[in-house]
């Protein structure tokens, strides 16, 4: 009970609860997000931040200039010099800052004025060893110091046992769990801290991989639907397509065919670049499922994408008896009623839709295949609602963010993965140029050239957080600039995350219809929407994006036989961006991204809580991950696991993507 902590009143309790800290365990597991290492500066360098200790020469003076705003000054004798120190909003310390008091300060040194503008002040002297100061994520209204006091009090009340099995502790010579917690919050030196952090990282990754290993075993045990389908029928169908499938597409179809005709349950991820042709693969999966006698559903993240799929499906199956329907937020009540009826009596074979499919009155006669397009756009719960509308349906996910194989094997250990590496033939790579802001005229001219040919253009700017006082062009400013340059002859559209869904869909539709020629947007532009006539994408401040993100963005052009262009505008980190000029292989690019930026940029992956670790980082801590994976598998298969607390935790959290 948090109430048992000294000085923790109802107001603080409420704040903590709002930050998901509801009990003692949550509190002790609220780890610092970084540690400041404080040690005495060896020399004072003009303009740099220094850390120095000394004795107050006189009592501190405070000047109050506004409610809760003040500036305090004092003279600090540091042994070989006297510094003029000023610090803001610490007036409340005045009574303690008397002549003769020992303090140490951190702040910027000004040599000419012999002064320091301090940001931090602490009582006491620095020792010859560095002090490690844990820094917690800001919790409104609770200071770092107060939080630390609460946590340390909580530590005395917390007697939970370690989760990790004893043999793991021995294997890695980990310290006792209680010691780890104490050291995470009160590290006395860097080595002890490192040990504690490694323990926590390992524990996080052990739990994660235990769950994946568990899910894999469950999946393999789970009986699925066994269909009897003649593969020749699939080949005949494929032969009639207006284009020849790539070998990778065929291999995916073969994988899926094998899954669907085997009695175990499919849980497969199809990875491939934007435009690599995942959709047709999923359509053929639905065809196999149909021939096997079951209904299919495909959920897309937006109305416009659902409609695109629907149209394509209707075309694809026009010479068959397959009945395809669509259900979105726009479907009228009357139509919906009819759809519900026909899904329940098995009349509809395939239903495409948006979140509307999740509604509880949508029931199926015999749902056999559930597909989610752009899987990362849905929450785990949403996906599981859909799955549960059938008895053991097979599952197919599609993702346009390929990840390197070694990581895929670990992170998606509970899924089978099929990759589409090659693009359909005839597809031209997007011609990519990295340019600086000073070359903007050249870029604008290139834009005009495309517009004159009757083509369309995407202009992308990074999302801007308001508190950032950076020089990044905000989306509105960019829109105004583009309006000035092209507004006289062309129509512009604006698209960003703050707009309502309907507004977003409307503007996207207008772009698709070529009522808008230049779409200025943040990265919210839809990954899967085909705008065949768009031939150029200009991405400003591209240093702000991961390579994979940019690669996905440029995949929005080049969906045709025309020459397409991507301009990356940036004055920084251009070295990294040049990779995109030379390769169009999403797998290679994501590998590069991993090398350069770590796992932080893995959007489109397991991001739904499961992959959010407090301390571990999939890339940086890859070695720990591999150990944890192996150990957790051994543990899962041992008798120790049965009835353990970990078994309970895994069972309660068994829902993973
Ligand atoms: P994504 O993998 O991004 O979902 P799509 O499935 O939307 O890509 O395919 C992009 C475009 O390429 C679509 O218009 C699709 O009809 C077309 N396409 C798919 N496979 C082939 C192929 N083998 N040959 C030619 N065009 C193809
Ligand atoms: Mg797609």
Image: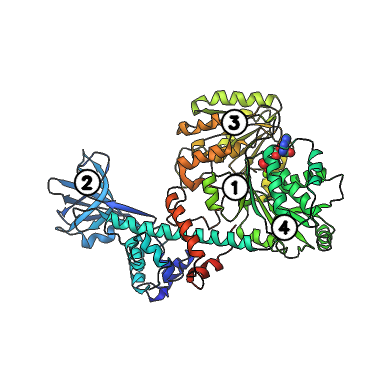
Mark 3 and mark 1 residues within 8 Å of each other at the beta carbon: no
Q: CA distance from mark 3 to mark 2?
A: 48 Å
| Circle 1 residues within 10 Å: few <14, some 14–19, many ≥20 | few
From the viewer's side, name the closer residue of 206 and 84: 206
Q: Nearer the viewer, residue 633 or 468?
A: 633
Does any atom of ligand 2 lie closer than 8 Å to the CB of label 4? no
CA gap between label 3 and label 4 equals: 35 Å
Nearer to the camera, 345 or 241 = 241
Q: Tell me which numbered mark, 3 or 1, is placed earlier along the sequence.
A: 1
Q: Alpha carbon of mark 4 to alpha carbon of mark 1: how far? A: 21 Å
Q: Between marks 2 and 1, how big is the CA–CA gap?
A: 45 Å
The residue that disc 3 covers is 566
Q: Which mark is residue 356?
A: 4
Mark 2 crowd level (few <14, some 14–19, many ≥20, 10 Å Cα): few
Q: Residue at x 85, y 58 (%)?
A: 347
Question: Horizontal and vertical percent for residue 195?
Answer: 33, 57
Q: Which residue is mark 2?
A: 41
Q: Does the residue at mark 2 contact the one at mark 4 (Cβ under 8 Å)?
A: no
- Quadrant the C terminus occupies: bottom right
Q: Where on the image, by quarter, is ligand 1?
A: top right
Quadrant for the N terminus, please: bottom left
Q: Whole-Å distance between the Cαs marked 3 and 1?
A: 22 Å
The span from disc 2 to disc 4 (Cα, nearest Å) is 61 Å
> Which residue, given by chain and number where applicable, does mark 1 sit on?
497
Crowding at dot 3, Cα within 10 Å, few <14 / some 14-19 / many 20+, comes out as many
Ligand 2 has an atom within 8 Å of the beta carbon of the residue at disc 1: no
């Amino acid at each position: 009970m948090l109430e048992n902590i000294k000085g923790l009143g109802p107001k603080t309790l409420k704040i903590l609860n709002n930050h998901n800290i509801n009990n003692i365990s949550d509190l002790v597991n609220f780890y610092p997000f970084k540690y400041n290492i404080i040690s005495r500066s060896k020399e004072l360098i003009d303009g740099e931040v220094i850390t120095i200790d000394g004795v107050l020469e006189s009592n501190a003076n405070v000047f109050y200039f506004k409610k809760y705003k003040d500036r305090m000054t004092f003279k600090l004798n540091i042994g070989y010099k006297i510094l003029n120190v000023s610090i803001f909003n610490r007036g409340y310390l005045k009574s303690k800052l008397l002549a003769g008091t020992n303090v140490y300060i951190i702040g910027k040194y000004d040599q000419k004025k012999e002064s320091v503008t301090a940001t931090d002040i602490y009582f006491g002297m620095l020792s010859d060893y560095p002090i490690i100061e844990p820094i917690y994520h800001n919790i409104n209204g609770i200071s770092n110091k107060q939080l630390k006091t609460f946590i340390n009090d909580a530590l005395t009340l917390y007697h939970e046992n370690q989760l990790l099995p004893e043999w793991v502790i021995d294997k890695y010579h980990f310290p006792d769990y209680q010691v780890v917690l104490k050291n995470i919050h009160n590290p006395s030196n860097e080595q002890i801290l490192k040990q504690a952090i490694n323990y926590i990282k390992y524990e996080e990754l052990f739990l994660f991989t235990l769950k994946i290993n568990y899910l894999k075993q469950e999946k393999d045990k789970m009986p699925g639907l066994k269909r009897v389908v003649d593969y020749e029928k699939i080949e005949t169908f494929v032969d009639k397509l207006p284009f020849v499938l790539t070998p990778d597409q065929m291999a995916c179809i073969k994988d899926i065919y094998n899954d669907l005709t085997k009695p175990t349950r499919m849980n497969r991820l199809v990875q491939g670049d934007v435009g690599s042709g995942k959709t047709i693969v999923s359509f053929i999966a639905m065809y196999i499922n149909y021939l096997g006698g079951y209904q299919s559903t495909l959920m897309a993240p937006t109305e416009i994408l659902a409609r695109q799929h629907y149209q394509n499906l209707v075309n694809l199956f026009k010479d068959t008896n397959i009945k395809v329907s669509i259900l979105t937020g726009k479907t009228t009540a009357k139509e919906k009623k009819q759809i519900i009826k026909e899904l329940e009596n098995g009349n509809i074979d395939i239903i495409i839709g948006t979140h509307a499919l999740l509604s509880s009155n949508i029931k199926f006669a015999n749902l056999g295949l559930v597909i989610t397009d752009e899987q990362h756009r849905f929450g785990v719960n949403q996906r599981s609602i859909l799955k549960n509308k059938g008895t053991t349906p097979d599952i197919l996910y599609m993702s346009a963010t390929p990840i390197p194989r070694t990581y895929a094997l670990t992170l998606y250990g509970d899924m089978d993965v099929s990759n589409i590496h090659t693009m359909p033939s005839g597809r031209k790579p997007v011609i990519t140029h990295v340019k600086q802001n000073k070359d903007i005229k050249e870029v604008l001219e290139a834009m005009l050239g495309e517009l004159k040919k009757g083509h369309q253009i995407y202009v992308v700017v990074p999302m801007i957080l308001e508190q950032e006082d950076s020089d990044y062009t905000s989306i509105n400013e960019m829109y105004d600039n583009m309006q000035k340059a092209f507004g006289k002859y062309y129509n512009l559209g604006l698209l960003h995350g703050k707009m309502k869904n309907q507004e977003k869909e409307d503007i996207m539709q207008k772009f698709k219809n070529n009522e808008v020629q230049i779409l200025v947007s943040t990265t919210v532009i839809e990954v899967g929407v085909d705008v065949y006539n768009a031939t150029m994408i200009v991405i400003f401040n591209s240093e702000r994006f991961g390579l994979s993100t940019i690669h996905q963005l440029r995949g929005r052009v080049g969906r045709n036989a025309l020459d397409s262009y991507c301009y990356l505008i940036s004055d920084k980190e251009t070295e990294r961006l040049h990779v995109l000029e030379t390769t169009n292989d999403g797998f290679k690019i994501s590998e590069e991204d991993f090398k350069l930026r770590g796992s932080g940029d893995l959007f489109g992956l397991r991001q739904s809580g499961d992959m959010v670790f407090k301390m571990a980082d999939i890339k940086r801590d890859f070695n720990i991950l591999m150990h944890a994976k192996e150990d957790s598998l051994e543990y899962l298969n041992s008798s120790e696991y049965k009835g353990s607390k970990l078994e309970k935790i895994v069972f309660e959290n068994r829902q993973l993507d």
